[in-house]
Image: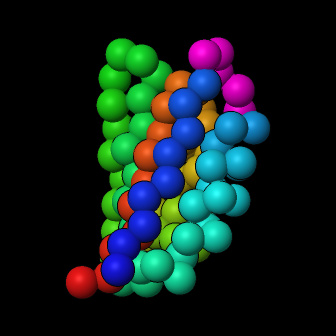
Amino acid sequence: MCAIFGMMIKEPDPSMVGKFFNGFAHLQHRGQESAGVAYSDGEDVWIHKGMGLIQSVFGRDLTKKENVIEEIINKKPLMIIGQTRYS
């Protein structure tokens, strides 16, 4: 099984990313093997994906000293879509 969840807004709003991940996390049971998102500011598109649960793919990566969700917020996306996967 897999799950797909997305959101789109007209003007940049940092709270949209939090709302997206809240809804996206509710679909975690549909796929627990990997997760990925594509997001866009209307001009550029970025992708982040990885193996594991949403929390481990998008939480703080202690080896890289980064927080993917903060990085997404800083890009000011107008649209974001995510997928969880279970093969």
Q: Quadrant of the N terminus?
A: bottom left
Q: Which residue does the image show at 55% across and 39% down from the upper left?
A: 7
Q: Which residue does the image show at 44% across and 46% down from the upper left?
A: 81
How many numbered marks are there?
0
Indicate whether 75 appears above or below 69.
above
Residue 36 visible to the viewer? yes
- Prevalent SS, magenta region: loop
Taking the magenta stretch, the answer to whether it contains residue 62 is no
31 or 57, nearer to the observer? 31
Indicate whether 65 appears above or below 15.
below
**Place of residue 87 in the rendered image (x, y in percent of width and height, measured from the top left):** 24, 84
Q: Which residue does the image show at 70% across and 26% down from the upper left?
A: 13
**Place of residue 75 in the rendered image (x, y in percent of width and height, measured from the top left):** 52, 29
Indicate whether 20 appears above or below 12.
below
Residue 56 visible to the viewer? no
Q: Quadrant of residue 83?
A: bottom left
Q: Which residue does the image show at 52% across and 63% down from the upper left?
A: 58
Taking the magenta stretch, the answer to whether it contains residue 11 is yes
Residue at the far right in the pictured view = 15
Judge from the rendering whether residue 81 lies leftward or rightward of residue 16; answer left or right: left
**Place of residue 12 in the rendered image (x, y in percent of width and height, measured from the top left):** 64, 21
**Place of residue 69 in the rendered image (x, y in percent of width and height, measured from the top left):** 59, 51
Residue at the far left in the pictured view = 87
- Look at the image and name its color scheme: rainbow
Which residues lie in the magenta part? 10-14
Indicate whether 9 appears above or below 80.
above
55 or 30, nearer to the observer? 30
